[in-house]
Image (tube, rainbow, N blue to C red):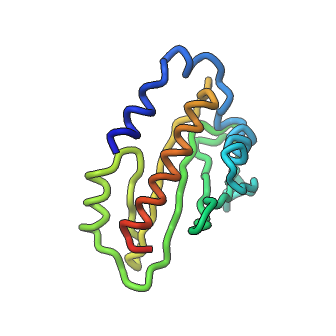
Amino acid sequence: MKRLVHALWALPLAAQAASADVIASDPDSVLKVLRDQGLAATMETDDLGDPKIVSHLTGDSNTEFVVLFYGCTDNVDCSSIQFYVAYDMKDPVTALKMNQWNREWLFTKATLDDEGDPGLEMDVILADPGIDRKLFKTTVDIWQQSIDAFEDYIDW
């Protein structure tokens, strides 16, 4: 896990601010990077009318996840996103198990619904001026690695 932290922060700060290619106020910029990473992704809207991207991991799991947009004004001009995936388990998962995940993993947060089904989320601030593609691609890589590890962790 420490390698993920070092990989994210190893990017020079000047490169992060050089060109803001990905910004929440332009949901298509997020969609484009997901597709460039080889993920199937489609733009939709959530129940409030805000943008929402539905995507799938590639490979054996083909896990579906969503990218939700937050801090939106009148369903546009959003300031952050949240990657989110949920699982419908046969047997409930304990809060103790989710807390253990949260103590050991950076960037992602494990949650439980009322039925004991786990979820995983990762918040990303993409307010003006946004971030460059390289850093956002690293963020997407961290999300994908976290899903793979989380699915092993919950015996999915």
- In the rendered structure, the answer to whether residue 144 lies left or right of residue 153 reads right
- In the rendered structure, the answer to whether residue 156 lies left or right of residue 79 reads left
Rendered residue at 47%/49% (across/down): 122
Rendered residue at 61%/52% (across/down): 67
- In the rendered structure, the answer to whether residue 140 lies left or right of residue 111 reads right
- In the rendered structure, the answer to whether residue 83 lies left or right of residue 45 reads left
Q: Position of residue 63 (x, y in %)?
A: 58, 66
- Which residue occupies the foreground of this view, 4 or 29? 4
Report if residue 76 is visible in the image. Answer: no
Report if residue 36 is visible in the image. Answer: yes
Q: Position of residue 142 (x, y in %)?
A: 48, 45
Rendered residue at 28%/67% (across/down): 97
Q: How many marks?
A: 0
Q: Looking at the picture, does residue 142 appear above or below residue 77? A: below
Q: Position of residue 44 (x, y in %)?
A: 74, 57
Furthest residue in direction bottom, as rendered: 90
Q: Position of residue 14 (x, y in %)?
A: 53, 14
The quadrant of the picture occupied by the N terminus is top left
- Which residue occupies the foreground of this view, 108 or 147? 147
The quadrant of the picture occupied by the C terminus is bottom left
Rendered residue at 56%/40% (across/down): 80
